[in-house]
Image (cartoon, rainbow, N blue to C red):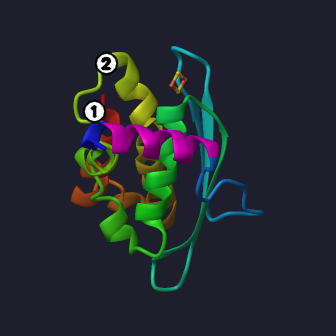
């Protein structure tokens, strides 16, 4: 089987059997967003432990096969990682897991919707935790920049 067929199978499999699909009650981090082109939407839930790692992550909502597959992959990349490492996950990390480096501009929004939600939700979480004067910290400014310019 060629690499592109393997990736295609992976996307179909993830979309039919999403990983980390569900919700968390009273999560430390929650955010919802949608793809304006199709109306599909994703809710992302995360809990954070004392070591500032993502102890639990779930997602809910609806999207195309690429959207659900990329969200599954992203949640797997996120679980158990320190927040400082999670915020470094970039679009190439997600797209290359599923062989999606050459998506057109419409499909790229499907693939990266959940990464955008992840980055904005952690930005919001860290901003709330920090004192007002720290919200312009280099780390937060970069995180917001990353989230705003994903696609
Ligand atoms: Fe809606 Fe892809 S078509 S997220």
Along the line of sight, the residue nearer the viewer: 49 or 127: 49
Q: Tell me the magenta residue range.
A: 5-16
Left or right of 130 on screen, residue 149: left
Other-residue count near label 1 (Cα within 10 Å), few / some / many at <14 / 14–19 / ≥20: few
Q: Compare marks 1 and 2 and give the one earlier in the sequence.
A: 2
Q: Estimate the x, y position of residue 15 in percent, counting from the top left.
A: 57, 41
Q: Select label 1 or label 2 by which is in front.
A: 2
Q: Pick out the residue farthest to the top.
A: 37
Vertical position of residue 27 compared to residue 145: above or below: below
Callout 1–callout 2 Cβ contact below 8 Å = no
Q: Estimate the x, y position of residue 94 in percent, counting from the top left.
A: 33, 48
Magenta stretch, main secondary structure, is helix
Q: Which mark is residue 149?
A: 1
Q: Which mark is residue 26?
A: none
Residue at horizontal 23%, vertical 35%?
Answer: 101
Along the line of sight, the residue nearer the viewer: 93 or 135: 93
Left or right of 147 on screen, residue 3: left
Q: Pick out the residue farthest to the right.
A: 25
Left or right of 97 on screen, residue 124: right
Q: Pick out the residue farthest to the bottom.
A: 50
Q: Secondary structure at mark 1?
A: loop
Along the line of sight, the residue nearer the viewer: 91 or 13: 13
Q: Which residue is mark 2?
A: 105
Which quadrant is home to the N terminus? top left
Q: Quadrant of residue 45?
A: bottom right
Vertical position of residue 114 compared to residue 124: above or below: above
């Amino acid at each position: 089987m060629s690499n592109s067929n393997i990736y295609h199978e992976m996307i179909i499999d993830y979309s039919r059997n999403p990983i980390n699909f569900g919700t968390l009650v009273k999560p430390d981090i929650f955010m919802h967003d949608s793809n304006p082109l199709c109306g599909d939407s994703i809710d992302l839930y995360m809990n954070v432990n004392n070591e500032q790692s993502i102890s639990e992550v779930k997602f809910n909502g609806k999207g195309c096969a690429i959207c659900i597959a990329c969200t599954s992959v992203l949640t797997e990349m996120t679980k158990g990682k320190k927040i400082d490492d999670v915020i470094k996950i970039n679009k190439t990390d997600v797209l290359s897991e599923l062989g999606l480096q050459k998506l057109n501009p419409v499909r790229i929004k499907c693939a990266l919707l959940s990464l955008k939600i992840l980055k904005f939700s952690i930005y919001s979480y860290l901003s709330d935790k920090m004192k007002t004067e720290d919200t312009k910290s280099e780390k937060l400014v970069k995180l917001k920049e990353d989230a705003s310019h994903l696609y």
